[in-house]
Amino acid sequence: MHWLIGLDWGTSRLRAMLFDGDGAVHEARSRPWGIRHLPQGGFDAALASICDGWPRVPVLAAGMVGSRQGWREVPYVDTPADVDALVAGIVSVRSADGREVGIIPGVRDGIAVDMMRGEETQAIGVLALRPELRGHARLLLPGTHSKWIEVRDGRIVRLATMMTGELYAVLREHSILGAGIAGAGASPAGTDAFDAGVREARDSGSAGVLTRLFSARALVLEGCLAPAAVPDYLSGLLIGEELRAALALGWVNAQTPPLLVGDELLCVRYRRAASVFQLAEPDTVADASAHGLWRIAQAAALVGQSTFARGVY
């Protein structure tokens, strides 16, 4: 049986998964060791610690670990990109304890001048889980930098980034809009204030949400919005703006919502926002990264075929 260690190594967190020979996750570990927050000893120490006690098996990593600030910069693969293109772009690095780590490249959209690292592996995971989407699908991976991904014939053909999560953090923590709400946070599933923010963005039309952002302050001053509700209202404004822009750009329409991929609680907020826009309810895929790592490892001949993903391609 061929085992595998898969790493989802981002900016703020490192997640390691030990796969058994059938592609199931035997054990998973997580540490706050993103590429900007490494322990003493750097990448080598982080890998040795998180893999402590695990067998000496192939290691495959996805995410910002392959960025310019990562362990080894791995050149982007241009769209259209499929699993074979990603395999061809893998770059290996040997750790201090002798493990060979393959780092999956990110994907670059040269037409839109956009790029991603880590989300390409999630897209491959979605296709492994949902092969019926291989012909054509539009995926939405919400987060700090939301990624909109179009897939055709099993290849990533187009992508767009919307910095929704990062803008929320900046406005919440470093602008007048967040004044006086220390300690308050957005609720996991959204609230009436969230819905109000989504509607405000939806109704901004061609003007866009920039013309409505100050309403988060004005409504508090008028006594129409409780200070503790500002985080939810801001979240609704920004997620609503993301959907408004996606509709304007043709990424989504009322009948064909994107497939949501990623954190379940965050996806709940996007589904709630979609309902305010009267879009069809989006479906959700939770842990696509693990499936993507295993599928790419198969294509790279690091592991054998398994019942987990056999016959997908």
Image: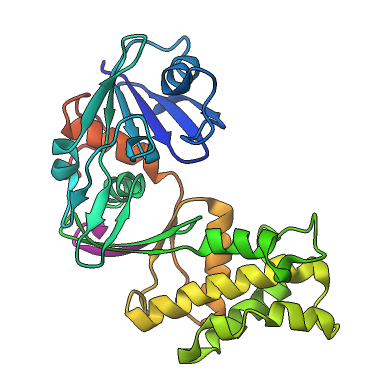
Q: Position of residue 294 (x, y in %)?
A: 29, 33
Q: Is residue 246 above or below residue 86?
A: below
Tell me how the rendering is colored: rainbow
Magenta span contains residue 134 = yes
**Residue nearer the viewer, 286 or 57:** 57
**Residue nearer the viewer, 105 or 261:** 105
Q: Position of residue 109 (x, y in %)?
A: 23, 60
Horizontal relation, residue 78 to residue 174: left or right: left
Q: Quadrant of residue 299?
A: top left
Q: Quadrant of residue 227?
A: bottom right
Kindly give the residue lying farthest to the right in the view shown.
223
Q: Position of residue 131 (x, y in %)?
A: 24, 52
Q: Is residue 197 above or below residue 288?
A: below
Q: Is residue 39 above or below residue 197?
A: above
Quadrant containing the N terminus in the rendered view: top left
Horizontal relation, residue 289 to residue 240: left or right: left
Start and end of the magenta stretch?
Answer: 132-139
**Residue nearer the viewer, 120 or 313:** 120
Q: Residue at x 80, y 54 (%)?
A: 183
Q: Position of residue 192 (x, y in %)?
A: 72, 75
Q: Is residue 164 above or below residue 286?
A: below
Q: Residue at x 67, y 57 (%)?
A: 188
